[in-house]
C-alpha cells in the first residue's frame, strides 16, 4: 500500500494516532475517538484539530476506497438488467373483502 501523502499536509495516520498498517475499522474507531475529544460540545473544544481530524479521515477513507479489492455491491456489477413490463388491459379491481365503508347514522 502506498502510504505517501501530499507535501505540505500532515500525515493522516499521525493526525489520527495510527500506524500506516491500520485497517478500515481501526481508522473509523480512531476518527470517532478524536472527534469526540475535540468536538465543539466537548469540555475542551479545538476547532483546528477537529478540521484536521476530519480532513485526515476523509483522505484515508478515500484512499482505502480506491485500494479496496471488494467487488461492487450491486449484484449485476454495473450491467443493466432488462425488465419486461406487462401492461394490464384493465386496472386491478379494488379490494372489497372488508365490505363497503359504513357511516354512523348520527354523523353526516
Image (cartoon, rainbow, N blue to C red):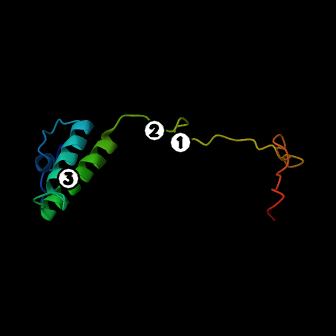
Which residue: 24% across, 47% down?
A: 60
Where is residue 3 shown, x and y percent of the image? 18, 43
Q: Count every numbered label the image shows and give the total.
A: 3
Q: Nearer the viewer, mark 3 or mark 1?
A: 3
Q: Is residue 63 left or right of residue 83?
A: left
Q: CA distance from mark 2 to mark 3?
A: 25 Å
Residue under numbered circle 3: 56
Horizontal and vertical percent for residue 56? 20, 53
Q: CA distance from mark 3 to mark 1?
A: 30 Å
The quadrant in which the C terminus is found is bottom right
First in residue order: circle 2 vs circle 3: 3
Q: Residues within 10 Å of mark 1 (few under 14, many from 20)?
A: few
Pointer 1: what residue?
78
Of marks 2 and 1, which one's residue comes earlier in the chain?
A: 2
Residue at the image position 22 percent from the left and 57 percent from the top: 55
- Give the class, few, some or many, for how many residues have Cα within 10 Å of label 3's Cα (few <14, many ≥20): many
Q: Residue at x 22, y 41 (%)?
A: 29
Residue 49 is situated, as x and y percent measured from the top left of the image, at 13, 59
**Dot 2 corresponds to which residue?**
72
Amino acid at each position: 500500500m502506498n502510504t505517501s501523502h501530499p507535501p505540505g499536509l500532515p500525515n493522516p495516520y499521525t493526525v489520527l494516532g495510527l500506524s500506516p498498517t491500520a485497517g478500515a475499522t481501526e481508522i473509523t474507531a480512531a476518527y470517532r475517538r478524536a472527534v469526540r475529544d475535540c468536538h465543539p460540545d466537548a469540555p475542551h473544544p479545538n476547532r483546528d484539530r477537529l478540521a484536521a481530524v476530519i480532513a485526515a479521515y476523509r483522505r484515508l477513507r478515500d484512499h482505502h476506497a480506491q485500494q479496496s479489492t471488494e467487488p461492487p455491491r450491486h449484484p449485476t456489477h454495473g450491467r443493466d438488467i432488462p425488465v419486461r413490463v406487462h401492461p394490464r388491459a384493465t386496472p386491478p379491481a379494488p379490494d372489497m373483502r372488508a365490505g363497503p365503508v359504513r357511516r354512523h347514522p348520527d354523523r353526516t
